[in-house]
Amino acid sequence: MSPTIRCALSFLALAAVAFAAPARADARDAVLAAHRATMDARVRVETVSSAGGQQARSTVRYDTSRRVHLKTDRMEMIVLPEGIWMRNGDGGWTKPPFDASALVRQLVPETVEQMQKGLSNVVDEGPATFGGQPARAYSFDVAMTMMGISVNSRSRILVGADGRIVQAVTDGEALGKKSRSEQTYHYDDAIRVVAPN
């Protein structure tokens, strides 16, 4: 699977969990609540993914869950309610001739449903630390279909004292290929995502 597809699937999965149902008081709901709290914040997510002996890096900046700036080693994409812009490398920005943002708006609710159905084996692993700060560790499995692709994964997240995710490590399999993704989260109220000039 290409790094671009992996990043797109990762974006959809994270956005999907953010819109999940209100939390109850068990480990499963604590995981959903942590994802919602993360997506309600302005955050930059740095990801290092590896698959088939190749490594890829990406950065996703969330102004809100509907105002997102994704940058990988090879491409860049800005997703806003009014449209999507893309570019390869340092080339010029292009806007697809069709309303690609409508496709994203359609996929997120479908992915929410798949994520809720596919979330299982959630374990509260107890206290942990990240960057010298207290955190709580959770692990869980997800089996779902996104954009027609079956995805199975095992994740471990660290949730900070403020209830937001500070680190996530995911081992997944899609299209018969295994991958590993390590994400770190940096919260910054100054993040803004706007259309390119």
Image (cartoon, rainbow, N blue to C red):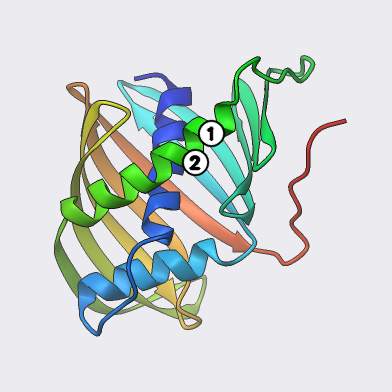
Badge 1: residue crowd in 10 Å (few <14, some 14–19, many ≥20): few
Does the residue at mark 1 contact the one at mark 2 (Cβ under 8 Å)? yes
Query: Callout 2, which amino acid?
Result: Arg
According to the image, label 2 marks what residue? 105
Residue 62 numbered tag? none
Q: Is residue 92 above or below residue 8?
A: above
Q: How many numbered discs? A: 2
Apparent side of residue 68 relative to residue 163 in the rendered image (left or right): right
Q: Where does the image place residue 47, in percent across and percent down from the top left? A: 49, 43
- Secondary structure under the numbered disc 2 in the rendered image: helix
Query: Callout 1, which amino acid?
Result: Ala
Q: Where does the image place residue 171, in percent across and percent down from the top left? A: 25, 43
Q: Where does the image place residue 170, in percent across and percent down from the top left? A: 30, 47
* Quadrant placement of the N terminus: top left
The residues bearing labels 1 and 2 have C-alpha atoms spaced at a distance of: 5 Å
Apparent side of residue 24 relative to residue 104 in the rendered image (left or right): left
Residue 102 numbered tag? 1
At x 24%, y 85%, the residue is 25
Residue extending furthest left? 121
Q: Where does the image place residue 4, in percent across and percent down from the top left? A: 48, 24
At x 50%, y 79%, the residue is 133
Q: Is residue 9 above or below residue 117?
A: above
Apparent side of residue 113 relative to residue 82 in the rendered image (left or right): left
* Quadrant placement of the C terminus: top right
Residue extending furthest right? 197
- Secondary structure under the numbered disc 1 in the rendered image: helix
Q: Please tell me in which quadrant of the rendered image residue 165 appears.
A: bottom left
At x 27%, y 50%, the residue is 113
Q: Is residue 177 above or below residue 137?
A: above
Q: Please tell me in which quadrant of the rendered image residue 12 appears.
A: top left
Q: Is residue 148 above or below residue 38?
A: above
Q: Please tell me in which quadrant of the rendered image residue 150 appears.
A: top left
